[in-house]
């Protein structure tokens, strides 16, 4: 599949550094500005797939920036502008080295741990007698240390985060408060679309002025898991799989091919036909999550388009 953006090599005016994550590339400029570019890379089990998914970067960026706008009244965020469908520009922050994962339901990683007999995750107890995809009595926060590309994120307890000095106790209490508030709002937004926000992760940073703000993506299918609300309880009662909106379908496909990112496992080949179905699923995710029709950007020369739009924006604010 052509016309995807896998890597960038821009040189913007006042550029100081570039950070390349699993999916996003972040350019730091003078005046404490960050240019964040959402690529079409697909990551699963902390492994970046060799081929890109058309429109994925646009989809993630547009969901994230819409959700930032929809939560700005309860939690401050880093975002200033979105001059291109794949680009977000905002204030540079010092990121906290933890991902604040919050779970409303026993799904994904938590369900796999539960099936293995564990009743504690990140120092948080999980009740006995649950089945996969049951709702927790209250959402639980299960943080993870943030890994560099190629490494695995690791579960960590609140106590260890504070004990190891990764985040101070005072800052952690703010992260916890913001995480709960965002999840509550995200749950309300999802319910209006006939969806259940199952679990998600938030990342935070601190501005030069010392303010804690939300950064990176929010409520996207890469960072969150959604179920369709219609028929949820009926499926639970039958012990049937939930109909879901997330990139879990990619993980399940990889698992079916014998791959979970473990040593010695071979990454299965993604054919062009399969990649096209993944792209279509991401568009479906976008439309269900936002309630809006997805408008495909011009992908004839994505890098040139991004460069022109970013340069135009930077000229306007000078």
Image: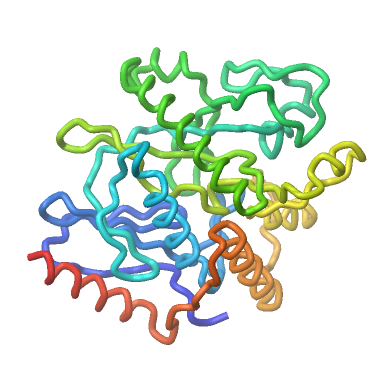
Q: Is residue 105 above or below residue 257?
A: above
Viewer-side residue, 20 vs 182: 182
Left or right: where does residue 67 sit relative to residue 47? left
Residue 128: x and y in percent read 79, 17
Residue situated in front as seen by the camera: 244 or 113: 244
Q: Relative to the observer, which residue lies in front, 14 or 271? A: 14
Furthest toward the left, the residue is 318
Image quarter where the N terminus lies is: bottom right
Residue 260: image location, x then y, percent: 69, 47
Q: Position of residue 133 (x, y in %)?
A: 76, 36
**Residue at 11% across, 52% down:** 31
Q: Is residue 230 above or below residue 121?
A: below
**Which quarter of the picture shows residue 84?**
bottom left
Residue furthest right as drawn: 238
**x%, y% of residue 202?**
45, 39
Which residue is at 63% across, 23% downward?
138
């Amino acid at each position: 599949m052509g016309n995807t953006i896998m890597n960038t090599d821009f040189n913007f005016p006042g550029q100081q550094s570039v950070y390349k994550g699993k999916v996003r590339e972040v350019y730091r400029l003078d005046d404490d500005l960050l240019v964040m570019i959402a690529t079409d890379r697909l990551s699963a089990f902390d492994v970046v797939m060799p081929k890109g998914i058309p429109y994925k970067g646009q989809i993630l960026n547009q969901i994230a920036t819409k959700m930032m706008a929809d939560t700005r009244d309860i939690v401050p965020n880093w975002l200033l502008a979105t001059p291109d469908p794949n680009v977000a520009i905002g204030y540079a922050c010092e990121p906290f080295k933890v991902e604040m994962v919050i779970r409303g339901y026993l799904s994904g990683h938590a369900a796999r741990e539960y099936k293995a007999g564990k009743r504690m995750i990140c120092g948080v107890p999980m009740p006995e007698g649950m089945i996969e995809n049951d709702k927790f009595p209250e959402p639980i926060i299960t943080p993870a240390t943030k890994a560099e590309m190629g490494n695995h994120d690791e579960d960590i307890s609140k106590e260890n985060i504070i004990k190891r000095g990764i985040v101070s106790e005072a800052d952690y209490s703010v992260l916890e408060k913001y995480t709960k508030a965002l999840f509550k709002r995200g749950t309300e937004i999802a319910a209006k679309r006939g969806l259940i926000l199952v679990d998600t992760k938030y990342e935070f940073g601190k501005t030069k002025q010392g303010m804690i703000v939300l950064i990176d993506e929010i409520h996207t299918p890469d960072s969150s898991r959604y179920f369709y609300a219609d028929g949820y309880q009926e499926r639970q009662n039958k012990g049937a799989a939930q109909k879901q909106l997330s990139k879990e379908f990619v993980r399940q496909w990889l698992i079916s091919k014998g791959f979970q990112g473990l040593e010695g496992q071979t990454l299965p080949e993604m054919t062009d036909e399969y990649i096209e179905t993944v792209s279509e699923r991401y568009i479906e995710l976008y439309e269900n999550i936002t309630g809006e029709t997805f408008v495909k950007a011009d992908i004839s020369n994505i890098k040139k388009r991004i460069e022109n739009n970013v340069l135009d924006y930077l000229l306007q604010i000078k």
